[in-house]
Amino acid sequence: MHLTNLKVSNFKSYEGLDVDFCQNVNCLVGNNGVGKTNLLDAMYYLSFCKSSRGSGDVPNIRRGEDFFAIHGRYVRDAVNEKGREEDTVSCVCRKGQPKQMKWNGKVCKTLGEHIGRLPLVMVSPQDQGIIMEGSEVRRRFVDGVLAQTDNVYLDHLLQYSRALEQRNRLLKLFWEAGNWDDGQMGIWDEQLVRHGEALRSGREHFFDDFVPLFDDYYAWITNGGEQGMITYVADRDKPLAEQLSAARARDRQALFTTVGPHKDDVELTVGDMAVRRYGSQGQQKTFVLAMKLAQFEYIYRHGGVKPILLLDDVFDKLDMVRVTQLVELVGSERFGQVFVTDTQVGRVEGVFAAIPQVEHRIFKVEDGGLKNV
């Protein structure tokens, strides 16, 4: 899958832009604050129907305007006699109206219907939150990977989230009314059990496949100098139905559901030390990069399509040898189309001078537009 053309209107800092990209490595170079990450975010929107920054849609409308529009043209290798096929995708957001996604000119009935069509992996400074922030961020990472490769898992995730919301609402209503109804609570417990057990099973299978991929990339980045470990942490001592039943009294006091897959975590360690507490900045960055490259590999193996890879400001704190090695890796046939942002034109040009076999285009980002370098 390759993004051959991107058009944006009134998106963040861009009034209008129409740009063509090559199928291998595309570099967006410019000073901080000129809009490099905004372009990557537009690509992210076309895959996930939302911003990578976690913000709502309206803040991404250019100041003074009442809408934004993002249009992408993609080419993919077909599995039939047609050879290569083209798809068009659009995301339009107007103030006061529901966001609209279109696939080949047809409006998507639900946003979930679109997720997974355009696999994409983004590596950015925000990913440090996978290590430094709470368990919710690590669960979101796992769920995001599975949502792109397993529609059944995605459906269980959406159904579980709805049931959890309803159960928590009911706990608050019972507290406000001063009564309790086991029958009503049991209805939502059944939904949580049905979908929650499926989530935990899906996550366990995920880590069985994901951890070896992570191990390979971590060993490559560190030249085998140390061992990183990923462990899925979930309470599986008892079935979820028993856990929910045993926790009811605690839930009534807390006014929210205290057990279930929404409380699971992922333990990240180097040796026997938690990366979050004892890892250096370099170790933390290495750990995250290995996780994201493993994410790419997992999606490709399970979805059959190489995701588009976005590398936002990943060269920071890496020496030229490591930068060149990384670009040579992602520019190889093992990966597909790649977009890289950097602040230094000279560094980017030096990298490709060392690996001229990698097809690439370099764009200078300035004044709300792009220029070929």
Image (cartoon, helix red, strand yellow):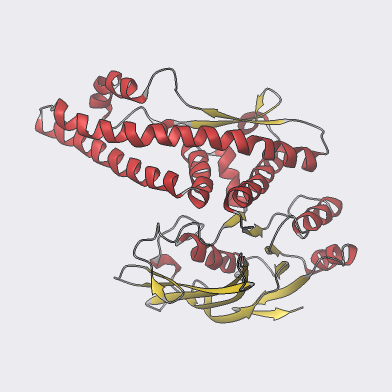
Outermost residue to the front: 81
Looking at the figure, which quarter contains the N terminus?
Answer: bottom right
- Quarter of the image for residue 105 reads bottom left
- Quarter of the image for residue 96 reads bottom left
| x then y, percent, for residue 111 | 39, 60
Query: Where 316 sits versus 249, above or below?
Result: below
Nearest the eye: 199 or 339: 199
Please report the residue visible at 39 percent of the width from the left and 43 percent of the height from the top. Answer: 157
Please report the residue visible at 60 percent of the width from the left and 33 percent of the height from the top. Answer: 208
| x then y, percent, for residue 221 | 78, 43
| x then y, percent, for residue 213 | 68, 40
Q: Is residue 152 visible?
A: yes
- Quarter of the image for residue 348 reads bottom right
Nearest the eye: 271 or 319: 271
Count the marks: how many?
A: 0
| x then y, percent, for residue 193 | 33, 31
317 left or right, relative to 101: right
